[in-house]
Image: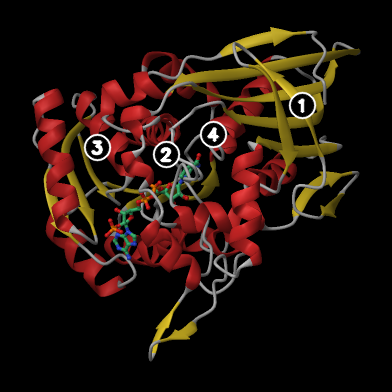
Amino acid sequence: MGKVLIIGAGGVGTVVANKVAQNNNVFTDIMLASRTKSKCDAIAEDVKRRTGVTLKTAQVDADNVPELVKLFNEYKPELVINVALPYQDLTIMDACLECGVNYLDTANYEPKDEARFEYKWQWAYKEKFEKAGLTAILGCGFDPGVTSIFTAYAAKHHFDEIHYLDIVDCNAGDHGKAFATNFNPEINIREVTQKGKYWENGQWVETEPHEIHKPLTYPEIGPKESYVIYHEELESLVKNFPTLRRARFWMTFGQEYLTHLRVIQNIGMARIDEVEYNGQKIVPIQFLKAVLPDPGELGENYTGETSIGCRIRGIKDGKERTYYIYNNCSHQEAYKETGAQGVSYTTGVPATIGAMMFLQGIWKKPGVFNVEEFNPDPFMEQLNKQGLPWHELFDIDLEV
Ligand code: NDP
């Protein structure tokens, strides 16, 4: 029924490969392609051992549209699941348009030479996808992704109007390393070192990096210092839920992590411009990635849980209501099931469910959409079945 091409063989690609194979009643033909084919082969071998399902593999440079077009025309997938890097979003979308293939990703486009992620580049493809009769599903990981679907679900079932949204992302895991990032270090460091930003009363309010912070209490974890940072789903959520008076994103960071980040920035290792070294041009943050622990290798000794959710205040039947919806995910359980840690797992499972929604014709309409624009209910049902169960709390102190 569904022929799917996964692009990207990192931590998230590992989880997607496992989950689509587990659901081979929906995904009947699967190919995993990436820049380094040996990584695809190793994942395919592991997936075969775990699930008995055979994946095809291929090498592709996703920065190169003609190479993508050649692969798409040979394999003829119905849908591409893009879990490479945000830099490849537009080239993959271009190739999809050229070959009549549908598209799904987990992170919005970001130019390599500018640490600035925005939806405008991908939203600009709306008409082209409409005309081609193709669907593009943007931001279908956990955040963005599940957090946006949680918001849509809350708006649909529990509120007449949502007014205040605080997305809270806690990683209370311990990987035993002095410093490591949970997903691609280059993308991660670019994201967390930029200025903070949140939406209030119809406009964006900018803050210094990590300026606003306080302890928030996470279920089964307890209080953790949490920091307001800018995160990409805020851009589409304030557009799609215009009743929002304020929308913020909080993430927990340990003191050790922040100290390392500060040092990395102060010594220039977070720079994204080229510097000359021994007659060769290098980009410091890319060099740093090469010496940091590989996020895909953190799983084995990772203990603890992630807890990500939405804290919402609004009106129902004329009365104020508070609501908290969240998922906790164990790094160890994720590793046992897929060989990858919890952050990759919480991204790869929603990407798989989004792909399932498309192939089953539930989330299928021509154009370019953020996930909150689709019916959240069938997706929410699958979260409970595919390893990311969610919980709801009503009329509690939201702390935010
Ligand atoms: P990794 O760095 O572990 O993996 C990225 C993969 O993409 C690697 O296999 C890499 O190949 C491949 N790749 C990079 N450039 C190219 C290229 N030009 N052509 C083909 N393949 C390429 O990243 P993660 O798995 O941690 O993250 C994957 C994506 O998921 C990222 O976009 C990230 O932003 C997103 N993400 C989203 C989250 C969410 O909740 N929405 C949370 C976490 C991540 P190679 O091995 O050769 O380097």
Vertical arrangement, residue 138 with respect to residue 334, above or below: below
The mark nearer the N terminus, 4 or 3, is 3
Residue for badge 2: 364
Spatial CA span between label 1 and label 3 = 36 Å
Residue beneath label 3, please? 17
Task: Give the mark nearer the N terminus: 1 vs 4.
Answer: 1
Residues at badges 1 and 4 in contact (C-beta under 8 Å)? no
Q: Which callout, 2 or 4, points at the residue further toward the start of the chain?
A: 2
Q: Amino acid at mark 1?
A: Pro
Circle nearer the viewer, 1 or 4? 1
Q: Mark 1 or mark 3, which is nearer to you?
A: 1
The quarter of the picture where residue 315 lies is: top right
Answer with mark 1 or mark 3, whichever residue precedes in sequence: 3
Q: Where, by quadrant of the figure, is residue 241 drawn?
A: top right
Neighbour tally class for label 3: few under 14, some 14-19, many 20 plus, Cα within 10 Å: many
Residue linked to disc 1:
215
Measured as percent of width and height from the top left, residue 237 is found at 69, 41
Residue 117 showing in the rendered view: no
